[in-house]
Image (tube, rainbow, N blue to C red):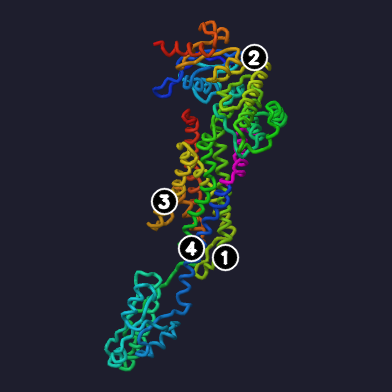
Amino acid sequence: MNALGTVFLKEVRDNLRDRRTLLSALLMGPLFGPILFAFVINLSLKQSLSDDSEALDVPVIGREHAPNLIEYLQSHNINITEAPADRATAEEAVKTGDYDLVLVIPETFGDQLASSVPATIEVISDQANTQAERQSRRVMRALRSYNQALSAMRLLARGVSPVVLRPLNIDVVDVSTPSGRSALLLGMLSYFFLFALLTGGMNLAIDTTAGERERGSLEPLLCLPVTRDQLIFGKILAACAFMAVSLSLSLVAFHVTLKFIPLEKLGMTPNFGALVVVQAFLLLLPFTLLGASLMTLVASFTKSFKEAQTWLSVVLLAPTLPILIVSILMVRPSTALMFIPSLSQHLLLVGLIKNEPVNMLHVLVSVIGTLIIGGIMALICARLYRREGLLG
Amino acid sequence: MISVNDLHKSFGEVKAIDGVSFEAQNGRITGLLGPNGAGKSTTLRILYTVLKPDSGSATIDGIDVVADSLEARCRIGSLPHGSGLYPHLTARENIAYYAKLYRMSADAIDERVEQVVTQLDISAFADRRTKGFSHGQRTKVALARALVHEPRNIILDEPSNGLDVMATRSLRDLIRQLKSAGKCVLFSSHVMQEVAALCDEIVIIADGQVALHDSPDGIRNATGCEDLEDAFVKAIHSVETSP
């Protein structure tokens, strides 16, 4: 077997026995994304679903002044509960957070209503409190529709059709497909995958230079009748292999996680079946060469394992940058953008999840472009590995 | 046989070695002696090809270390300063990894690894991972690793550093064994007694230059000192005070 293969196999075996590598490559990296994702989605599901289906408790002062309104509110899934004795204590209680909001119906309410003067009603709430804000929005919505019902009745009583108050009929037609809507949320997936991929090879990339140096095994290694190119390419390939494993675990973990998240309740049906898992793996695979070379390159400038870890945690964030910029600018995929690694993978992946037809030219440019940049990085690594200063 | 001819090497402004020449013969033990920072390690690093000289040349069995470094490396077994092992591999795996990279055939490897394991008396811990090995155990494994491809020339950089009495003794025995097997052994040290006890030839280096190159007796005669340590101090002093 040639030297490159020997180095590759040794690195794989060595790192499979290293708890630190295993933890980050096979556990932390792949599972970080799915767990965070499931957590965030469940939280937002709870928030959005709890809104209208659950009864809302609203303390009301002066309920006896507006029996019709109270009945209307109760029919809209709002429970009327005990309130503080008077308006001043109510305000204080809302301020301290004992109550989220209090509805105050003044004594004059009935008279004002009867004489067709705008009847005052107060909603005491703390707008800085997000929980209270959502509740007050719901109460406001109920009050507004009561308002509309009353005005419609008044118009009818005067022989006017309530329709005259609706000169416009606004209808929003949403053309996004359920898969398309998921893409907004699932857009962050591509970063999780890139993160898992990079984490998988991080320890190997450090080991190639800083690690070997710190252990004192670099000098005897360089005395062997093996070219330095064979050594570094063997090591980079081993890092690629770990990255690929980490990536595939992460993809599978997501595939499984998504089955347990009721995304359809949010109006989303992400396209993330077994076929997409395989396609996504193939799309992201070229990024391993770039990731491994970039990390090896950065690590080669450091003096110790610890220092390398510090710098590489910055590299872990690097792929977010193009993704972030594009998400803010809302750029559509174009052939030119496919030359940018991490961005091209992100755009293609979002397309896959949205269930859009795959643009083969884009795929080709992304794969070849990323491989070329990765290859150049690897060559730079090899050049640096040939320096005398390598021994430190 | 190792031959060094007028080597120069600078790191920036600092001249590490400044015209070092000597020969180390087969079947003899040559000691490279000098104070810290004299240029011993730089000379050895050029010999096992991790550094390139600025000028001058060095050959291993007649093969130039710069022009044909891969071939030269095949003929050297080296123990660089503070030789590290892979902690997750067993001693045997560490040795076998090097054997593979020395392009030995798969059949030969097992047999040869077993030989060096016996020769260096490491069979008791050969199948344990090297994490947690004592310094003595690590040095033995590193030596086994350096000898696995049966090199004709052996270069050791301060091999006895940090070893206890027993380990030092077995290291000396090993070096004598290698000598009687006709190998060319070159090692560096800053401990006079060690060099005196072992070497057929002593090369004293100071300030990047060869101060003296002779047999222990020759050195005693040349400096007029009966005690080798005094001779060593005198030789170094003569270089450091010369303009």
Taken as a whole, is the magenta stretch helix, strand or loop? helix
Q: Position of residue A126 (x, y in %)?
A: 34, 73
Q: Label 2 lies in what chain?
A: B
Residue A261 x %, y %: 54, 66
Tell if the residue under mark 1 belongs to the same chain as the one under mark 2.
no
The kind of residue on which mark 1 rests is: Phe
Q: Secondary structure at mark 3?
A: helix
Q: Look at label 2 and name its amino acid.
A: Gly
Residue corresponding to mark 2: B27
Q: Type of residue at label 3?
A: Leu
Residue at 38% in and 57% down? A328
Which quarter of the rendered picture does the N terminus of chain B lie within? top right
CB-based contact (under 8 Å), mark 4 and mark 1: no
Q: CA distance from mark 3 to mark 2?
A: 63 Å
Q: Nearer the viewer, mark 3 or mark 2?
A: 2
Label of residue A321 in the image: 3
Q: Nearer the viewer, mark 1 or mark 2?
A: 2
State the image coordinates of residue B2 (x, y, percent, origin top left).
Answer: 58, 16
Identify the chain of the residue marked 4, using the numbered disc in the image.
A
Dot 4 and dot 1 within a common chain: yes
Q: CA distance from mark 3 to mark 1?
A: 30 Å
Q: Residue at x 57, y 64 (%)?
A: A259
Numbered tag placed on residue A217 in the rendering = none
- The image's mark for residue A260 is 1
- Residue that carries the numbered disc 4 in the rendered image: A40
Q: Is residue A260 magenta?
A: no
